Amino acid sequence: MKTAFVTGGSRGIGKSIALNLGNKFHVVVGFSVSNEKADEVSEKIISNGGSSSTVQIDISESNSVDEAFSSIEKDYTSVDVLINNAGITKDNILPRMKENEWLEVIQTNLTGSFYTSQRAIKLMMKNKWGRIVFISSVVGISGNQGQANYAASKAGLIGLSKSISKEMGSRNITSNVVAPGYIETDMTSFLDEQNRENIIEQLSIKRIGKPEDISNIVSFLCSDESEYITGQVIPVDGGLTT
Amino acid sequence: METNEVFEKVKGLFIEDLGIDESKVTMDAKLEEDLEIDSLGIVEVVMAFEDEFGIEIDDEELADVSTVGQAVNLLHSKI
């Protein structure tokens, strides 16, 4: 059975992706702090008839990424599917943005995905098969006020993914980006009712997105059926960007 | 380790990891022209060497390597 590693797999979009991939892969649920939530996701996959385990990983630290991958390799020999989902926000309007707010978001969201992708690709090259999906954001395409750091990190993932797609195509490794719009998760829970209505107003599909809207396309991009799709950015945003 | 032992290990990696025909792997064989290894293939070979021999190979050291024999000599000098 192929192994899929989902960073930030204990909640939100990552949780939905982990549960969905559990139908086809051994799923390693990566978590940074919420080990209980990661265990719950893993147990749910197993109770659904799948196979799963968890691993602690701080993607912003290369040592932690090395340790997590070594542990996955030891137990499951490879990583065939990598979902770069973990990310953080530290919102602030640019004139007020502190250097550490910029650096921490770039380090985790962009450099962290470089660490994980580099490790995974070395394994995928040996197997001559691999699927990488980056969870970016429409904010990385359109920008957003108060999110210069987050938007830059998410735009950076697009360049990273497209470069991987060109380097690795000859080894049957695809790399794609999914760019969610407004999705119902902890990360968007700060929105009040008025914010919600304003957002829905801008959408073609008149509702806030669900994590499953993202995990369905991610699951397809991890399948054999998607082998001719690589280097792409797929917004899943109810028509926010057209 | 003797040069011929290094060669045998290198030969094994070419055959097993890259599926290259055993008869083609000679000391004089050119990596790109004779063995038809692309640039990414060279990277794979280097990573396999590093794992097999427990060494690190710098990009600069690779600049002069275009044949199996040159690779074997480089590895021999580093072990």
Image: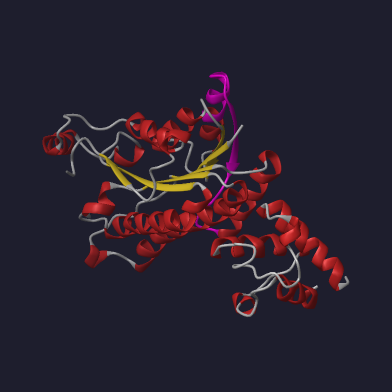
Q: Is residue A46 visible?
A: yes
How is the rendered protein coloured? secondary structure
Residue A221 lies left or right of residue A117; in this view the side is: left
In the image, A30: left or right of A78? Answer: left
Residue found 71% across the figure and 64% down from its top: B50
Return the x and y of residue A28 as percentages of the image width and height: 57, 37
* Residue in front for this viewpoint, A126 or B41: B41
Kindly identify the residue that appears in the image at 62 percent across and 60 percent down: B44
Left or right: A106 in relation to A27: left
Locate the N terminus of chain A by quadrant. top right
Name above or below for residue A28 compared with residue B55.
Answer: above
Residue A47 lies in the magenta stretch: yes
Q: Is residue A223 visible?
A: no
Q: Position of residue B57 (x, y in %)?
A: 67, 72
- Give the answer, above or below, for where A38 lies relative to A98: above
> Where residue B37 sits in the image (x, y, percent)?
60, 62
Please state the horizontal and vertical placement of residue A213, each as a whole percent of the image: 32, 31
Residue drawn 46% across the image and 60% down it? A111
Q: Which residues are magenta?
A: A41-61
State how many labels appear: 0
The answer to which of A6 and A192 lies nearer the viewer is A6
On the rendered image, what quadrant is the C terminus of chain A found in?
Answer: top left
Instruction: Please tell me whether residue A149 belongs to the stretch shown in magenta.
Output: no
**Is B77 drawn above or below residue B48 in the view shown?**
below
